[in-house]
Image: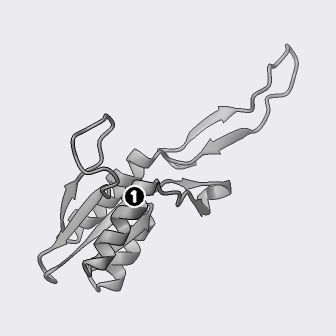
Amino acid sequence: MSSSAVAYPMDRRLNHGDQMPLLKIMPPPEADEEKWAIQLYELGGCVVVKFSQRQSSQQTRGIADLLVLCPKLKTSWWHEVKRRQGPEYKKVAYGQTAHQKGFQVEVEAAGMVYIIGPAPVAEQKLKELGIIR
């Protein structure tokens, strides 16, 4: 079990003498995925501008969580962080709000790159750019 995974017993009351049920492993929260993605980008020499906030703000609705600037390659891209889910975290919750979809359309219409996903997507992007192996 990874150090960030949270385990909890199945929703079932135990009586004295009952066998303890297997523990269900919960995927890391989106905030952890974002933190790991930022760390990866910074290790790759990128500068990350973080737009995600836990509370309501005055910023553009639907704006992606991260704007990643890569001075080495003179490029940048937007990253909408999503959390992993399902057995062994094999699935990703790609659901976007209407505002997020609209922002993605505007970003791509302007010729910029917009990626969606958890920390491994950040790693994949850095590999594509040749920043890491």
Residue at the top extreme, as displayed: 16
Which residue shows up at 26% across the image and 66% down it?
Answer: 41
Residue 2 percent coordinates (x, y): 52, 49
Q: Is residue 123 above or below residue 32?
A: below
Which residue shows up at 79% across the image and 29% down it?
Answer: 20
Nearer to me, 77 or 35: 77
Residue 100 percent coordinates (x, y): 39, 58
Q: Amino acid at mark 1?
A: Gln
112 vs 21, left or right, is left
Which residue shows up at 69% across the image and 41% down it?
Answer: 24
- The residue wearing badge 1 is 100
Location of residue 76 by image quarter: bottom left
Residue 69 percent coordinates (x, y): 17, 70
Which residue shows up at 63% across the image and 44% down it?
Answer: 25
84 vs 32, left or right, is right
21 vs 71, left or right, is right
Q: Is residue 20 above or below residue 89?
A: above
Q: Is residue 38 above or below residue 15?
A: below
Quadrant of the snapshot with the C terminus: bottom left
Location of residue 101 by image quarter: bottom left
Location of residue 48 by image quarter: bottom left
Residue at the right extreme, as displayed: 17
Nearer to me, 10 or 100: 100
